[in-house]
Amino acid sequence: MRMILIAGGWSTERDVSLSGAHGIAQALGRLGHEARLLDPATDFAGIIPAAREADFAFLNLHGSPGEDGLIQAMLEEAGCPYQGAGPKASFLALNKAAAKALYEARGLRTPAWRLYTGIAGEARLCDLPCPLFVKPNNGGSSLGMSRVERPEDLGQALDKVFAMGQAALVEECIPGMELTCAVLADRALPVILIRPRAGTAFFDYENKYAADGAEEICPAPVDAALAAEVQGMALAAHKVLGIEGYSRSDFMVDAQGRPFILETNTLPGMTPTSLLPKAAKAAGMDFDALVAELVRLGLSARAAKAKG
């Protein structure tokens, strides 16, 4: 098929997007497809014309645009199939506060949270106990995240996020084990245990993408009941957000063994060190097979919508 591989963009995760696109392009070539890279940052106006001529668009964008549903909406207007979540699900999942509100409505356990918007006169007090995590409400790869140990440091952490032009999500810290679980179609993949490298406070950008970053063990060495609960919560989050194709949800497990869902990613990373390819490999699916399955799911979703 003639494809466009949409990657890059102008978010703080641009480099991660382009890094993953390189491996995806090679996989698409091995699968017999012709893929042309299209970067919204340099050719935004070319997206719709290119999509009208393409058989499929493979998205590898992180942050906005991409995970916010904008590009997906443009592709739908152009009548071009693509993999993964549609515009609505993408928008809801990227907005951490909206996603957490939906988790709670579904009965999914998530850390207590507050949203700060940076409007004039907004009180910079928080009734949640420290330590707290402060993060951009829209974004990923842990960019802009801070761990706040004292109430008097909250303002500085909020300013860090506001300087990025974002609202800030303040979230209760759940000390314990970090797990992540991907969903592919209607099944949860093996759970992954994440151990941040020594001396780091959390699973930050360097832990995620550096060669000497966090240790990621798949399948996670946890008991079967916990793994099943995490997989069930990942599937539930996938469904409550209305996601199609695939996703990956992140969790913290407290001292009582209770998993708390943190967020759901609609365009999980596809770099050589990313978690989704690692989970797929543990399930018996190599990288090329994973890419092929994502294309198949995208085409199937398009066909189903055409019938409906």
Image (tube, rainbow, N blue to C red):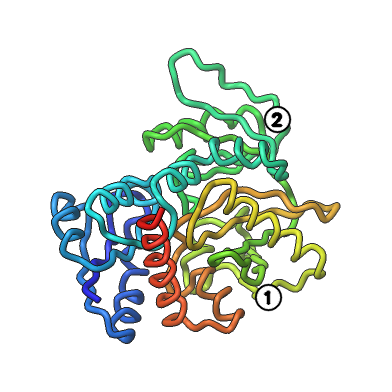
- Mark pair 2, 1: CA separation: 34 Å
Give the numbered dot on residue 155.
Answer: none
In the picture as drawn, the residue positioned furthest to the top comes out as 121
SS assignment at label 2:
loop
Dot 2 or dot 1: first in sequence order is 2
Q: Closer to the camera, 174 or 276? A: 276
218 horizontally vs 84: left or right: right
Determine the residue positioned at 80% across, 70% down.
224
Dot 1, crowdedness within 10 Å: few (<14), some or many (≥20)?
Answer: some
Q: Position of residue 110 (x, y in %)?
A: 69, 43
Give the numbered dot on residue 219.
Answer: 1
Q: Quadrant of the N terminus?
A: bottom left
Determine the residue positioned at 58% across, 64% down.
186
Q: Position of residue 289 (x, y in %)?
A: 45, 81
Determine the residue positioned at 64% across, 57% down.
234
Which amino acid, by three-letter code, is at mark 2?
A: Leu
Q: Position of residue 126 (x, y in %)?
A: 65, 25
SS assignment at label 1:
loop
Dot 2, crowdedness within 10 Å: few (<14), some or many (≥20)?
Answer: some
Instruction: Determine which residue is flagged by label 2.
Output: 128
